[in-house]
Image (cartoon, rainbow, N blue to C red):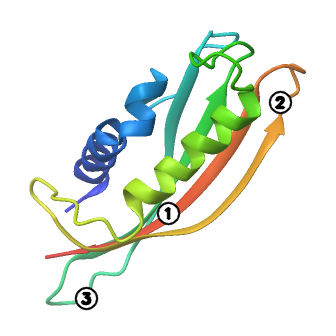
Amino acid sequence: MDATVPLLTAIRSALLADLDIAASGAEVLDSFAPPGAPGAYLTMLTRDEDWSTSDTVGQTIGVEIHVWTAPGASTVPDIPDTTLCRTLMAAARRALHHAPLTLTGAHLVLIRVTGSAGPTLDPDGATLHGVITTSSLTGN
């Protein structure tokens, strides 16, 4: 059993359902946004560890939610891009911490936000980048 794809699907749905994320027009992708892309994006990276035993199947899955805001990404007048990046980071934390996500073909025991970093200025000198880390426990 690999619960990674069902978990990413459920996380993406939860993020898209958040009112702040929806109002921002941010896209939620399972890969990186194209370099220099305008707007705001949330992307997901994963890492996992199998904790199965002889009679139980399970994974611990870490998902990093990367928040990217390009210059001028804010669709709300007079809202600076740092505020937009921070708003999207807060929305991701709120949407995911202890969320009752439903996974297809797998069982989510727990998801929690374990940390965040940023926003920081990317090497391009213009894009802001923040990261939210989560840890999920899945099992049968």
Name the residue tied to disc 3.
53
Give the x, y percent position of residue 49.
44, 70
Kindly report which numbered mark, 1 or 3, lies closer to the viewer in this rendering.
Answer: 1
29 shown above or below 93: above
Q: Are marks 2 and 1 in contact (CB under 8 Å)?
A: no
Quadrant showing the C terminus: bottom left
Give the class, few, some or many, for how many residues have Cα within 10 Å of label 1's Cα (few <14, many ≥20): many
Residue at 38% x, 29% y: name it.
22
What residue type is disc 3 on? Thr
What residue type is disc 2 on? Asp
Mark yes or no: residue 32 visible: no
Quadrant showing the N terminus: bottom left
Side (left or right) of 82 relative to 49: right
- Rendered image quadrant of residue 48: bottom left
Q: Element at badge 2?
A: loop
Name the residue tied to disc 2.
122
